[in-house]
Image: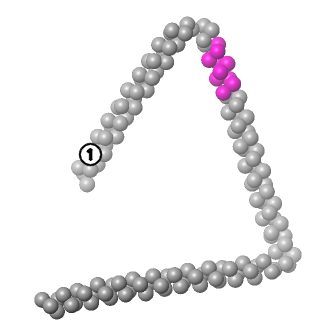
Amino acid sequence: MESLQKTLQDLVNAGIGLYKVSEENVKKAISEIEKAFDDLKAKGATENSELVANLRKNLDDLVNQVNNLNLKANQTFEDVSKQVNENLQNILSEIEKYIPKEQLENIKSKIDEFNNTIKAKTEDLLKQFKKSENTQN
């Protein structure tokens, strides 16, 4: 029994040692990769040939174009959102002119009730799905 216990302890210690050595090797490899990358960056930064200068310029131009497109897209989205909101407010104002407020409140109440029913049914279906999924596993 004692030799079994010693063997198990030896196996655990060997496993721990293997883990520590592996961890050290991984950290060392990461450090070496980072150093190699930094060396490559430094060598690349000193390169000033015409080809490299053109490559850097083209990259800068591309980044600027992407940034400009992003700004334009954001502005367009904001403009469209603003216009949609204005149109929606105008439509709602027109509806309120022709439909009495009490009727609108009743319609809103029915829509909320409908939404709550759909939400409850969806939650029930999701619970049933999860339950059947758990019983299958």
Residue at the image point whose x is 70% and y is 37% from the top: 78
Is 95 in the magenta? no
The location of residue 46, given as percent across then percent down, is: 80, 80
Q: Residue furthest left?
A: 1
- Mark 1 belongs to which amino acid? Ser
Q: Residue furthest right?
A: 50
Residue at the image point whose x is 45% and y is 23% from the top: 112
The location of residue 75, given as percent across then percent down, is: 74, 41
Kindly report the secondary structure that dominates the magenta region of the rendered protein.
helix
Q: Nearer the viewer, residue 53 or 23?
A: 23
Residue 89 appears in which quarter of the rendering? top right
Residue at the image point whose x is 18% and y is 87% from the top: 5
Q: Residue furthest bottom?
A: 3
The residue carrying mark 1 is: 132
**Rendered view: 69 above or below 51:** above
Q: Which residues are magenta?
A: 85-94
**Local SS, label 1:** helix
**Rendered view: 136 above or below 62:** above
Is 88 in the magenta? yes
